[in-house]
């Protein structure tokens, strides 16, 4: 098999690696965004829970607790988004690793095939040189009585 026939396959594999790397960067960006939002929500909840309750009416206290519960719910939902984004990032990382493995395997296979082709060419060339040497030797011995 002509080793150059691997070149388009290698190019396709390298394109897949680039696409997987781009997708991985994108999901990592989403993960960072979700993590930042979660951190902000947790800081806000912590600060809000730390505000003293003194001097508030019963209605204000009920409203305050309801708001604090809502902030906690939103933080839990955001934590779920973070978990989902982490799983997506891990899945995309695995796809990137696999794409890199495939591209590297094709490059190694092409290198092996090129080395084999070079050895065949070298053997053929050496065989031709050996044949010429034998013919020259025979021709010289025929001329010498």
Image (tube, rainbow, N blue to C red):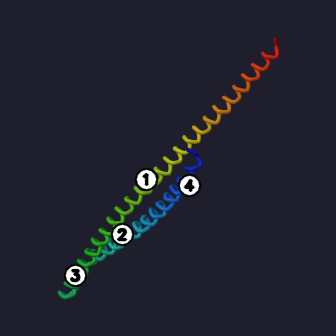
Closer to the chain start, of discs 2 and 3, is 2
* Residue 48: quarter of image: bottom left
Image height of 36 relative to 64, above or below: above
Give the SS element for disc 3: helix
Could you classify mark 1 by the number of other residues whose Cα lies within 10 Å: few (under 14), some (14-19), or many (20 or more)? some
State the image coordinates of residue 81 (x, y, percent, origin top left).
32, 69
Residue sticking out furthest to the left? 58
Q: Which residue is mark 2?
A: 39
**Left or right relative to 116: residue 33:** left
Give the SS element for disc 4: helix
Closer to the chain start, of discs 2 and 4, is 4
Q: Which residue is mark 1?
A: 98
Q: Nearer the viewer, residue 118 or 48?
A: 118
Could you classify mark 3 by the number of other residues whose Cα lies within 10 Å: few (under 14), some (14-19), or many (20 or more)? few
State the image coordinates of residue 126 (x, y, percent, origin top left).
67, 29
* Residue 24: quarter of image: bottom left
Give the Cα distance between marks 2 and 4. Answer: 46 Å
Q: Nearer the viewer, mark 3 or mark 4?
A: 4
Closer to the chain start, of discs 3 and 4, is 4
Closer to the chain start, of discs 1 and 2, is 2
Q: Which residue is mark 4?
A: 8
Q: Which residue is mark 3?
A: 66
Image height of 133 relative to 141, above or below: below
Closer to the chain start, of discs 1 and 4, is 4
């Amino acid at each position: 098999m002509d080793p150059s026939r691997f070149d388009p396959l290698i190019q396709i594999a390298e394109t897949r690696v680039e696409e997987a790397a781009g997708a991985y960067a994108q999901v990592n960006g989403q993960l960072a965004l979700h993590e930042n939002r979660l951190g902000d929500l947790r800081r806000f909840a912590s600060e809000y829970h730390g505000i003293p309750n003194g001097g508030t009416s019963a209605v204000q206290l009920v409203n305050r607790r309801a708001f604090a519960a809502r902030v906690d719910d939103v933080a839990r939902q955001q934590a779920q988004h973070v978990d989902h984004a982490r799983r997506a990032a891990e899945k995309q990382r695995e796809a990137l690793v696999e794409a890199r493995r495939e591209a590297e395997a094709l490059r190694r296979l092409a290198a092996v095939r090129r080395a084999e082709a070079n050895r065949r060419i070298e053997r053929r060339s050496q065989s031709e040189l050996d044949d010429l040497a034998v013919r020259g030797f025979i021709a010289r011995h025929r001329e010498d009585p």
